[in-house]
């Protein structure tokens, strides 16, 4: 994949595929691959925020799921 802005859904999918490939590698990433992964992660953030936003959690669900620690006395 070329280093360029993500402008289309196919560009986004290709960036996600390459990111997953780099992250799935069991060996430690050196400067070329590690830098590529950092760059892809940064480029993917913009379309994700625009087209795939993560809604804030429901406060009650967060409490019920243990999102807020409570001590039993």
Image: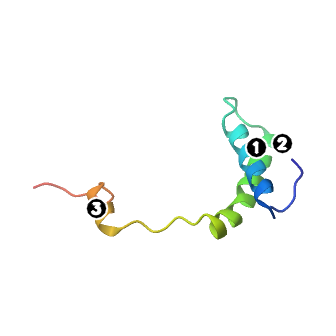
Q: CA distance from mark 2 to mark 1?
A: 14 Å
Q: CA distance from mark 1 to mark 3?
A: 36 Å
Above or below: residue 27 compared with residue 49? above
Q: Residue furthest right?
A: 2
Q: Position of residue 28 (x, y in %)?
A: 70, 33
Q: Residue furthest front?
A: 9
Q: Nearer the viewer, mark 2 or mark 1?
A: 1
Residue 18 is marked as 1
Above or below: residue 55 compared with residue 13? below
Residue 63 is marked as 3
Q: CA distance from mark 3 to mark 2?
A: 42 Å
Q: Residue furthest top?
A: 26
Q: Earlier in the sequence, mark 1 or mark 3?
A: 1
State how the image is colored: rainbow
Q: Which residue is mark 2?
A: 32
Q: Earlier in the sequence, mark 2 or mark 1?
A: 1
Q: Position of residue 31 (x, y in %)?
A: 80, 42
Q: Position of residue 49 (x, y in %)?
A: 63, 67
In the image, 67 versus 1, the foreground residue is 1
Q: Nearer the viewer, mark 3 or mark 2?
A: 3
The answer to which image quadrant residue 12 occupies is bottom right
Q: Position of residue 53 (x, y in %)?
A: 57, 66
* CB-based contact (under 8 Å), mark 1 and mark 3: no
Determine whether, in the image, residue 61 is placed left or right of residue 42. Answer: left
């Amino acid at each position: 994949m070329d280093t360029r802005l993500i402008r289309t859904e196919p560009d986004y999918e290709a960036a996600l595929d390459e990111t997953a490939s780099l992250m799935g590698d069991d060996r430690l990433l050196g400067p070329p691959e590690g830098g590529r992964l950092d760059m892809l992660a940064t480029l993917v953030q913009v379309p994700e925020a625009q087209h795939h936003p993560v809604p804030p959690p429901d406060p009650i669900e967060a409490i019920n799921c243990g999102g807020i620690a409570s001590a039993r006395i």
